[in-house]
Image: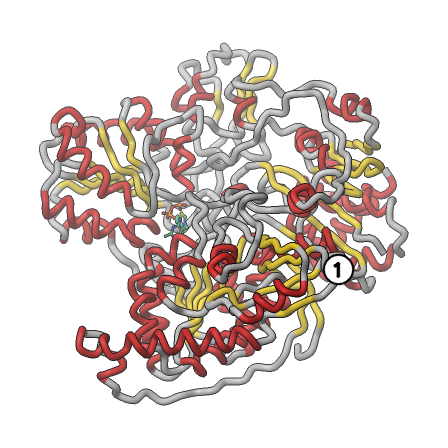
Amino acid sequence: MSNHKELMLGNKAVARGLYEAGVCFISSYPGTPSTEITEEAVKYDEIYCEWAPNEKVAMESAFGACLAGRRSFCAQKHVGLNVAADPLYTMSYTGVNAGLVIAVADDAGMHSSQNEQDSRHHAIAAKVPMLEPSDSAEALAFTKEAFEISEKFDTPVLIKMCTRVSHSQSVVETGERNVPLKTYEKNIAKYVMMPGNAKKRHPIVEARTKALTEFAETTDLNRVEMGGTALGIITSSTSYQYVKEVFGDDASILKLGLVNPLPEKLIRDFAARVERLVVVEELDPVIENHVRALGLEVSGKDLLPMVDEFSQNLIAETLGQPVPDFRTLDEAIPPRPPVMCAGCPHRGLFYTLKRNNCTVLGDIGCYTLGAVQPLGAIEMTLCMGASIGALHGFNKMLGKESEGKTVAVIGDSTFMHSGMTGLANVAYNQSNSTIIIVDNSITGMTGHQQNPTTGYNIKGDPAGKIDLEALCRAMGFERVRVVDPYNLEQCDKVLKEELAAEAPSVIISRRPCALLKYVKHQPPLTVDTEKCIGCKSCMRVGCPAISMKNGKAAIDNTLCVGCEVCSQLCRKDALVSHRKEA
Amino acid sequence: METKNIMIVGVGGQGSLLASKLLGHLLLSRGYDVKVSEVHGMSQRGGSVVTYVRYGDRVCSPVIDRGQADFIVSFELLEAARWLPYLKKDGVIVTNTQQIDPMPVITGAAQYPEQLVEKLNATGARVDAFDCLKLAEEAGSSKAVNIVLLGRLSHYFDLPEDAWMASLEANVPAKFLEMNKKAFQLGKNS
Ligand SMILES: Cc1ncc(C[n+]2csc(CCOP(=O)(O)OP(=O)(O)O)c2C)c(N)n1
């Protein structure tokens, strides 16, 4: 495999870089667009990989492994770094033993995220260096370089990915694996961050930033590409690719690969060589503010948007270059939003919640699609785990007015991630809350990762399995019920009972995701068109396999998995099951 | 050589990732610089999905913008219409005529536009529309729509058939190879 050219996904290139850099330990929590880094790394037998319950635990585990003297790594999406911010900010003080690198993948354009935050602020606030590749070849090379920087400067190092770098394939050349090991040595002054010790570490952090700034002036992570001098552009990441596409050699470019700390002299020198200086960066004006603080005249967010991702046409238009003509259709094109899959176990539960007019405080996962029409059954989604905390506060304030009709809905993976502490709060501070855990036995939204409730590890081998019922009982919940979301009558009955109960309760809605390989599907339903009166009752569950054709229900037999949730709504028995008993 | 652009569009779950993987492999084997950009995650759940394949001497941007696509390869008719603005003035749309109702159409909040092929033609765009699902089923699996489309796309490329076959062999499991080869030929000769 050495010195071999191939087309590689940016995330896979990071994984290859980890392999070549001799990484021994990876712990991550999935999150688009970062997930494939860890999924690709686990294919190398030489690297121990695991899914942690959340990003904080992942980062702390990677820190422990680096203390033990092995190069270590963790990956997360941008919002995952908020969860792991606590260890990060103090790891900046302790520094590392063997190298420790942390990938964070931003999602400008919010292809799969709840916000559009710019992770560079974390690098600045935590005072750790951040590298930002612009394609797969750089993703591989920068990952290796990040470990060198980590060990040389005694610091964790961030690698900032983004959707377009993580999820684009470009050409890379691979190399050999080389494993530098270190030994652990007790060092209380360095690793025990209590005030007396931390006070002595902070000046070291400031000195390190100074040294890294010097490094930024000369490292080839940053490079100048001189072209026409009428326009000089400072840029990084995927923005560099758009700029290069539009201008080729017509403009001069300062391409930054090390985005924290930023160089000063390099920027001043570049600015002096061009007539007009523009910073092209997605999201926040981080580089631009730095350039301004140097007292240089520069454009940036006065021209370019602070929201959404960029593209070549956007850069061309903004900087006065031509863009191609295009054709349009004079026709309303209906949108095609994502929907719950046919046979999704979440559907029956949300239908029940809607029928009971519940106020649903939601969480993040496939089940967030319960907010989409025709179900429209979720009224709040904030961040992972927030459903339970929010329900507690809501019920504490509204009491009887809300307790009988308000629920939290949270997935199995999300519950393990950050729902447990919320549940502890309900048990401790005693709100009369009803929490529904939608347990589809997998982390669905991010593409089927195992988690502590599934009984399998990242390789699919048997692993520890958390018993949700026992866990809830141990926290003090006396009312813990389990329902099958394919059984609408049962769901309805149990929901009503638990909402009426004068005690906090947990309902576990349990059925594995219909896309899991081991889940056996039933034959598709058929429509008895003699019996169907076209009342559209079956369409209230919003299944993509059901539509109306010529005034009658029609079932798409390439999608239907025979879950029979729809047929429970049909009063004319027109949806015919072809169930095969096991 | 100027960078060439192929967009692959469809509905999440239809198999567009295999199509882009195969094209990427093929174009790299012909010595081009290649970039392929995909979106994973949320939009895979039955939403509108798009993959960009770009090749040339040096490819910079991983995405294709309005007015730039030499080809739009579409798994579904409404998606072909959705992405029309991305077609280059003299580009070609190669599309399946299959129609999959999006949720707003299913719920009755919107209508699936009628006679889309005619309407696309009326804009002056070059449109090559045919029933890929029928051909895929004829080849042995409704899942082979992606390969039927690639067979059709191969018409427009000046590349030896061997090269396409080599990429097919490298990217599909051996037990489905014969079926996929048949799907490719059916698409090509339709
Ligand atoms: C802090 C944070 N980490 C990761 C994610 C990405 N993410 C969104 S939902 C989800 C988990 C969904 O799994 P689960 O709760 O089991 O619900 P399912 O999708 O299976 O219905 C993840 C990891 C996120 N949004 N925020």
Q: Quadrant of residue B91?
A: top right
Q: Nearer the viewer, residue A388 or A251?
A: A251
Residue B12 in percent (x, y) is at: 58, 40
Please indicate, yes or no, whether residue B21 appears anywhere in the rendered image: no
Q: Quadrant of residue B80?
A: top right
Position above or below: A125 against B46:
below
Q: Residue shown at 80%/25% (left/top)?
A: B123
Residue A539 in percent (x, y) is at: 47, 21
The kind of secondary structure element at disc 1 is loop
Q: Is mark 1 within 8 Å of ligand 1?
A: no
Residue A91 in percent (x, y) is at: 32, 72
Provide the chain ID for the residue under circle 1.
A
The quadrant of the picture occupied by the N terminus of chain A is bottom right
**A431 relative position to B129: left or right:** left
- Structural crowding at the residue carrying mark 1, measured as other residues with C-alpha within 10 Å and reported as few (<14), some (14–19) or many (≥20): some
Q: Nearer the viewer, residue A76 or A551?
A: A76
